[in-house]
Amino acid sequence: MISSDIGVWVAGLLTLGILSILYGDSALSRLFAHIFIGSAAGYYMIQAINSLWKSGIIPLLSGNFIFIIPLVLGLSLFSRLIRGYAWVSRYGLALLTGVGTGLLFFTAIDAQLIQQILSVIAPVKGNFYDVLVSIIRVIFFIFPIFYFIFTIKPEKTMNKLIHAGKYAMMIGFGASYGALALSRLTLIINVLSFILKDWFGLGLATLIHALTYY
Amino acid sequence: MSEKSFYDKISSIDVRLIYVSIALVLSSVIINPIGMPITIGEHATNLYNFIEQLPEDSLILIGIDFDVGLYSEMGFSLEAIIKHISSRGLRFIALSIHMDGPVNWAKANSRIDFPSNYIYGEDYVYLGFIAGQETAQAAIASDLKKVVTSDFMGIPFSELPIMNGVENSQDFAFIIEVTGQGHNIDSTARQYGSMFNRPLAYAVAGAAIPLAMPYYPRLALAVLPSIIGAAQYEYLADVPSSALKATDAVSLAHIFLFGLLILSHIGFWGQLSKAKRSGGKIV
Amino acid sequence: MTAVPTLFKRKIPIAMTFIIALVVALQYGIEHPYIITSSNTLKIFGVVVSSIAIILASLTLVISQMGYVVKKKADYWVGGLASLIFFAIFFSVGLVRGIESVEWAWIQKNIFSACTTALMGVAGFLFVSASYRAYKAKNIDGYLLLASGLLVMLSNTPAAVVLWPTFGPIGKWIMSVLNTNVQRAILVTVALGTVATAIRTVLGWQRGYMD
């Protein structure tokens, strides 16, 4: 049964408007794209204001006056909109950059370097197949790294290793493409499901009913 | 002007025809699912078994950090996991460092039938969106109550019994990150996994599977892959829902894309060999 | 107007970045209460400043859309006006009624969520057409990419796995052994680059973030 909810109809019409981009670029498709831009800007601003209220304003109003510091630093970011005073925003950016880089230093070395190396050089045990898989694992880890070494002039052997690394990466990226296909195809299913089921209420019972009615 | 050869024709199909074809093909199984069997993967099994063996008073942190447009990929995983957690009587705190998190929570919350004895504020709570990405995760992991003082509706923690005694990430038995973004995967591994050694699991979009897999098994005990993982988890947790119904459409979509790729390559290789024979080039 | 000294424009922000990064990084290894308290406080400050940064980003977007309307650029000013109207709807409902209200839930679900889902659907369709039009294997790199891609796709196809069960293990092996270790290699090189860039930023040798 086709939906009688006005919200679903609004959503459906917006969906069709945005899908019209597929037919070709037109004033209509651009209009709907701009509707999305405006909605997103409004939505994100309200969510950010809410986050600011909970994390910054409420503690300040509760007597935690140290929160004046981040509020002032945050307001300094707005100086980017004033010609000649954009340098004031560097104070707010210094806080964001300092915290961001501080968080990365040791955790990146642990999670993205040490743990990864330990995963690759895990002890080899088991049958011949397990040993073979371990060797392949090491090969597919080391060869792509050669591809990213730009400080050594590539000569005969180095060139072969770089090519081997490139082929290993192509196999890896092909697998990533396969995983990406799963993602993108699911998005199509998502939008079609909304149109067919939520909006037009199509399901086998409805279809049979419509056929027998006519 | 020379007539187009067979290879030229199959290499130059109008893309709008392709859009209509795939829409029609998928519509048929979306309206009438066939019910093809699925295979259960190790990641869904690992996650299910881990949650099954958690003690009854366990508290779980769920990060809802994906675009609302990707709901079909990760939203169904989120629903299945929450249904499993609630059926076991485990408690969870959900929050978002992605701005679309509140929309996804609203959608999941409206689709989940919580058990009658599973009460908001006592057994589960949603804290809303917290800005800052990795900074927010680090702040929450270190001292949650200093970052946020109320849930997403503004109810203060003093009125939410579940928040009693929750200080930082050490109070969580387990952290599940539901995300489609590589930087969220990395930041979760860094801030919860590396910094505080908390057990982690991911439910990720298809495109993010390769980005999360390096953390398995040392930092993450499972990487639930997109809608396929959601379907597997629904089956294991015995909560059949949208993901299981969509597997037919997923199959057909892949077969369509597979066929399209083969077709485009037949056309391309045909044009290549024709050009080689005539000594020309394909432009 | 007298020029602002370089001390305030450059040196103090760089010094701030250095000290903040040091305090936050030290928490990883030093469990002294002062370090932990300072580090946690700085992280919370970061959350507050980040939310203001998002407000600034949204405001900048709105200002650019207003520019289209005011300058009456052909084709864009109607779109600019539409985006401003919808921005105003979301902003006023969110501010006046609050995000816990029924009205906010309605516009969030039926406008924002619908638009985002549709846009993602467009991305899905475009992926299919791009795969058809642009993805052509011409050399060994392309053949390797195509072969592994097709095998992984077949392992993600429940129907194919039912038809020939070996598709499943093959695809999963490619993902878990080959692809994962390639991604590990990339992750390691990226981590080295990230740490190097972080050190350069903190020491003031790389000041791109200040522009």
Image: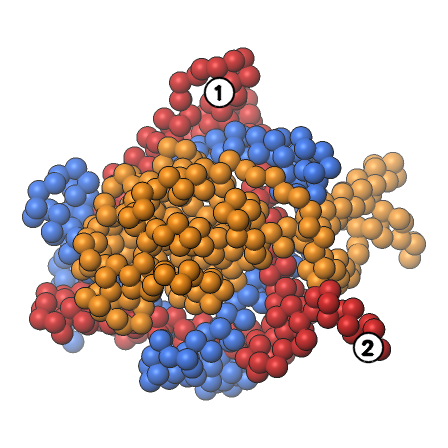
Chain colours: A red, B orange, C blue
Residue receiving disc 1: A134
Q: Is residue B229 visible?
A: no
Q: Is residue B62 visible?
A: yes
Q: Nearer the viewer, mark 2 or mark 1?
A: 2
Residue receiving disc 2: A213
What crowding class fits label 1: few (fewer than 14 Cα within 10 Å), some (14-19), or many (20 or more)?
some
Q: Position of residue C167 (x, y in %)?
A: 66, 34
Q: Position of residue A84 (x, y in %)?
A: 25, 72
The answer to which of C83 and C63 lies nearer the viewer is C83
Q: Could you tell me which secondary element the residue under label 1 belongs to?
A: helix
The answer to which of C125 and A123 lies nearer the viewer is A123
Amino acid, disc 1: Ser
Give the side of residue A30 with respect to residue B162, left or right: right
Give the side of residue A38 with respect to residue B251, left or right: left
Amino acid, disc 2: Tyr
Q: At 45% across and 25% down in the image, what residue appears? A: A142
Q: At 41% across and 73% down in the image, what residue appears? A: A43
Q: Position of residue C70 (x, y in %)?
A: 45, 86
The answer to which of C99 and C91 lies nearer the viewer is C99
C96 w.r.t. C14: above or below = below
